[in-house]
Amino acid sequence: MTPHTPALPATQLDGQTVAQLLLRYLALEGVDTLFGIPGAAVMHLLAELKNQRDKFRYVVARQETGAAYIADGYARVSGKLGVVLVTSGPGATNALTGTMNAQNSGVSLLTITGEVAERYYGMGYLQEGTDASLNIDAVYGNASGYSVIVTNESNFQTLFTQALRDALGLPHRAAHISLPDDVAATPVASVRFPNAAHNYRARPHGADPHQVQLAFQRLAGVARPLIFLGSGVREVLQGERLASFTRMIERFAIPVMTTPDAKAIFPESHPMSLRCFGMAYCEWSKDYLLPSRVDPKLPDGYDSLLVLGTQLGGFSTNKWDPALLPRESLVQVDLDQTVIGRVFPLDFGAVAELGAFIDELCRTAHAAHPHAGQVKARRELLARIHQRSPYLDPANRNSTKAPILPQAVMKCISDTVPPGSNLFVDSGNCVGFALHYLAVDPPTRVFSALSMGPMGFAVGAVIGAKLAAPQSVCLAICGDGAFLMHGNEVSTAEANGVAAIWVVLDNNDLAMVSQGMNQFFPDKSGIWNDYYALGKPDVAQFARSLGADAYDVKTVEDMQHALGAAINASGLNGKPQVIAVHIDASQIPPYYQDIKPPVHGGSR
């Protein structure tokens, strides 16, 4: 139903409990799956979920943080609202990290935490989260986009619809509702209940054509333009819009690069692609920013930059590298006006819905004529760049050494996963190897959580992804440290017939820390090599004990066989698949590259 479809905006409902109304709202939003761990403070909501088990599925995780990560992955892949339902006190605090991560990653997540009955407030009741030693509303209020306690049945509708508006608006956010159990059980005498989501929330759809025209002029009117895509365009830059955008950049020969958390939103094999910039950046992006690397006769730097859907944070900009600053014009476009101009000086900024902005940009470009000489020169430069390797160490990516190199693991994944797969990258050294050495095109998608970087995010999120897209390959890339944090959720996958795949880089170390400490605090004794060792756990045996098919891998041949077998099994037997890859622990991801500043000193 569109906003223009004639319909009564609301229906009169009498005698519904708050718990029943809450589930009606979730159904209106297309939610049929919730994630969490049950407890006494949500007993009336749990009872209603049981009564409506033909409409709703409650996936019981092994720990509340994992439940929030699973809901996050479900939301990213399905495009729906991710919902977490946990009990009060420690249940609520455990879910906090996953909720906070969704907030900082721009994911629509609703966390519902139970609370003790109001008559016990301030009396020290078991797991009380308000009016005593713990204030859950204050905790979540400082970590999410919206947090509130529903204090009685009369304010439920107002507060809950506000949570939905915040979570599902643009940009997406995480929202939190604290619901006392006695309030959940209370009937609402009479309520006007909406018949569609557009009866209580709306999204922006606009972009200023004049600003789009100016932005296009900045791109088309210079010798070396560049478009920088962030994860804010992930939802909108798909299908026909991606095709239209691609036609535009092909016609005008405008190169495109992405932030790390937007990896593969634009096809990385495309002749106009520079792949990722920022942390563990692609060598092609460096070549375009510093073209003297390709041709000593070319001056370093470039002319104009159009930034779409990124806040330009540290990981996205290689710690705000001055080489990213163009000589003439920097235009930043985002729906969130608070991030525009926050980091770099701009030619101008535009507050716009990014889908509408891209559509108008493509229409503007279609009516314009490329400068033939500039287009030819750019094509030639990009062709020369693409003749060079995009990898810092291409030999290691192609290596067949044993134990297997992590760079070669990424090549195996790139070569093996089918189109339309969903890849989740955890935090740690796996991020650097994956960002730099994976080569991925849409419709395959890559998801990460680099704003906060919690270890274990991908371990849980891949389960939610596979629940949302059971016919797709859903694969997590993580380290053994992260897998030991949240690998218990493999049991959640097994209990629910979820055949997700985990590729665990197993080196018995928190290597990102040990290698980083050795980088900044060198110690020739070699003490950092095992200072944060993990005790040599058997990752594959741990996974088997939780119900997974598990593989021990030490060579490229082993990896190719195991990954092929896991992908095949993931479509057949409903069992989780864990590949423990015993990697060469001496390999360091490309975190410590340097790009020297250009001489021009930045944009106007």
Image (cartoon, rainbow, N blue to C red):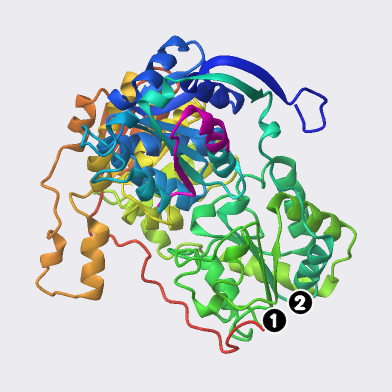
On the image, numbered disc 2 is attached to which residue? Answer: 222
The secondary element bearing badge 1 is classed as: loop
Mark drawn on residue 50: none
Q: Amino acid at mark 1?
A: Glu
Picture coordinates of residue 503, whole percent (x, y):
34, 40
| Of the image marks 2 and 1, the number of the one nearer the N terminus | 2
Q: Is residue 1 above or below residue 528?
A: above
Q: Which residues are magenta?
A: 143-161
Q: Which residue is mark 1?
A: 328
In the rendered image of this protein, does residue 572 appear above or below residue 165? above
Residue type at mark 2: give it: Val
Q: SS for tag 2? A: loop
In magenta segment, residue 160: yes
Query: Split into 4 quadrants, where in the image is the N terminus?
Result: top right
Q: Residue at x 53, y 16 (%)?
A: 16
Indicate left or right for 348 with 94 as reference.
Answer: right
> Answer yes or no: do the residues labelled 2 and 1 have beta carbons within 8 Å?
yes
Q: How many marks?
A: 2
